[in-house]
Each structure stands twice: as C-alpha cells, then as structure tokens.
Amino acid sequence: MKLTEMPGSNLRFAPLALGTAEFGSAISVERSFQIMDRFVDGGGTWIDTARVYADWLPDGHGKSEITVGKWLGDRGLRNDVLISTKGAHPEMSAMQVSRLGEQDIMSDVEESLNCLGIDTIDLYWLHRDDESIPVDGILNTMNTLVNTGKIRYFGCSNWRPDRIRAAAEYASTHELRSFVASQIQWSLAELNEDSGSDPTTVNMDNAGLEFYKETGLSMFAFTSQAKGFFQKLHAGGIESLKDAVKNSYYNEVNRGRMERVIEVSRQMNISISSVVLGYLISQPFPVVPIIGSSSVEQVEEAMEVLDVRLTPGQIDYLEQG
C-alpha cells in the first residue's frame, strides 16, 4: 500500500479516512469500537470526527468525539492514528449565524481536546465558512492554536477556492501557516441540482477540480460513495434505492457511469466500491475519501481500495465514456 503525503505537512497516511458522524449515537459504542478496530487492523490510519456530530439528536452532543476518545484511551493507539476534528460550525438551530470568531474557535478546540482526551489535534478543520468575514483574523487565530500546541495543522471544510486562495495569500504575505487540506463533497456520482442538499456545503465542480489540480492541495471527500448509490443500484436496481438517494443521484449521467463502473470492476476484478473509491484516490492530487461505515463488513469492503489505482484513461472513461 502506497502512503499519501500531504504537502505543507509531515503527515504520511493511508489514503482513506474513517468518518464517525453516528458513532456513539445511532451506532452503538460497542459497534463503533469494532469498526475502528477493523479499520486500523486493515491499515487505516486516519479517523475524522466533528464537534457538531450528533447535535441533531436530543442527547447527541459530543457523542462522536467522546466515543473516539474512549476508543483511543482503551486501545492505546494515539501514536498509531491521525485524528482530525471539525469546529466553528453554526449552532444547528441558527445555521445563518456563523461562528468563526476567535472565541468560538478557541472554545470548540478546547471542548474537542477534552472529549477526545488528547493533547493535540493532528488536523483541525473549520467546518463552515462565512465569506463576509475577512480571512485575516481567522488565519491569525489558527496560527495561535498551532503555536500553542493545541493543533498541528489546520484545514477548511466547505470553503470555496477563492477563499482558500485568499487565505494562502494572506499567510504568505505575513509569514503564517495556511490550510494544508480542504474537505468538500465529492464522488463519482453527479449530484442532482434539485436534490435539496444542504446549501452550506460545497460540492466539487469543474472550477474546483481545476483549482485542486493546479495547487495540489490535499482534498478530503465526504459522501465519497454517494450514499452507496452505485453499490445499491448494481445489487438491487432502482427499487433498492431509498428516496433520498434516488432524489440526489438518480439521473442519466449516473446511469451511464453505472455501466462503466461495472465494466471497470469486471476488467480489474475488483468490487464496485473499489472502483468508486479508486476514482477518487487515483486523482493527480492527494485525495482522501472519507468513508461512513455502519458495520465491520462495510469497512472491510471499502478498505480493499487501498491496493487499487486507476489509470488516467480509466478515470476519463468513468466520467465520460
């Protein structure tokens, strides 16, 4: 397995991250531990969580970070895995009110450190952006956190290319650190425009793809398997798709890509999941798919991609035919 290197850092890791949004809440603590165990046993090294995870549940606040922290302490694996978490997300009841001020960020970092039971966060994501706020103060706050040892590196989640460029320019001018990675929504499946997805999230588009190719900025892709669209469509047809998945991804473009996914799967003798995730990790810049698994079996299937690389020709074929 070839490890991924993140430009601008000294981090080297397997190119797959384990998402933990429902750990300790919809997914029991016991099963969460089993999933993380299997992920690490299979060569996984990156676990991704967030301060806001499970806040949508009555008693869910902090459950994901707490569960990851308990697992780290119980297994004694802090030095064997990389931990990222996200903060500065608006309150769920007031999504229109940003929380990118210094005190908001600092408070979230301290809560995350406490719940995770660690001294330093390997990579800290700013979970949302507010384009009305200048990058200056945000970058100054993040550099303070690095300098005090609270975090090692920082990235942005759901930020657009022009804002990432502005941050990089400010950091360069003032001899500061900037974002070493970005996290947005991306998969082989094209998202329907009327899908009703969260308007505060950023999806990969042609301009964004050119930006990442140009800069080489590391990219973490959430919803990387399009909620299992290709796997479920192949296994059970359209009837097997939940309405939310169908409304998001069932379209002419993806039906064509389904046929090509099956063909590449057959040619390479790999699973549908490996083709879908392989499309991402085989890009000409560092891409780390974030997998959301609710069972050990799903983790095992996803991790087969660590030994898969697609050619540029295969990537073009999957996209365009």
Image (cartoon, grey):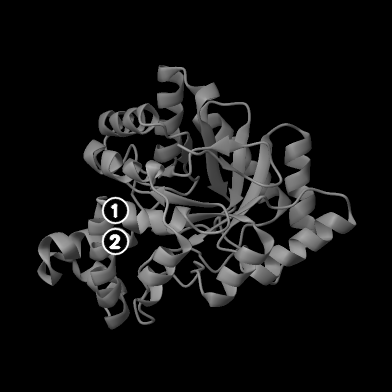
Q: Report the quarter where the N terminus lies.
A: top left
Can you tell which quarter of the image residue 226 is in?
bottom left
How many numbered marks does the figure carry? 2
Question: In this rendering, would 61 be left or right of 10?
Answer: left
Residue 207 visible in the shown view: yes
Label 2 crowd (10 A; few <14 / some 14-19 / many >=20):
many
Mark 2 highlights which residue? 264
Question: In this rendering, would 304 be left or right of 174?
Answer: left
Could you give the CA–CA distance between mark 2 and mark 1, rounded to whole angstroms?
6 Å
Under mark 1, the amino acid is Met
Image height check: is 133 above or below 119?
below
- Residue at image position (39%, 54%) is 278
Front one among 66 and 58: 66
- Residue 110 in picture, x, y percent from top left: 62, 36
Image height check: is 305 above or below 12?
below
Label 1 crowd (10 A; few <14 / some 14-19 / many >=20):
few
- Residue at image position (39%, 77%) is 320
Image height check: is 162 above or below 304?
below
Q: Report the quarter where the C terminus lies.
A: bottom left
Question: In this rendering, would 213 be left or right of 103?
Answer: left
Q: Secondary structure at mark 2?
A: helix
Front one among 97 and 64: 64
Q: Which mark is residue 53?
A: none
Can you tell which quarter of the image residue 42 is in?
top left
- Residue 201 in picture, x, y percent from top left: 49, 66
Q: Secondary structure at mark 1?
A: helix
Under mark 2, the amino acid is Val
Q: Are marks 2 and 1 in contact (CB under 8 Å)?
A: yes
- Extreme right residue here? 174
Mark 1 highlights which residue? 268
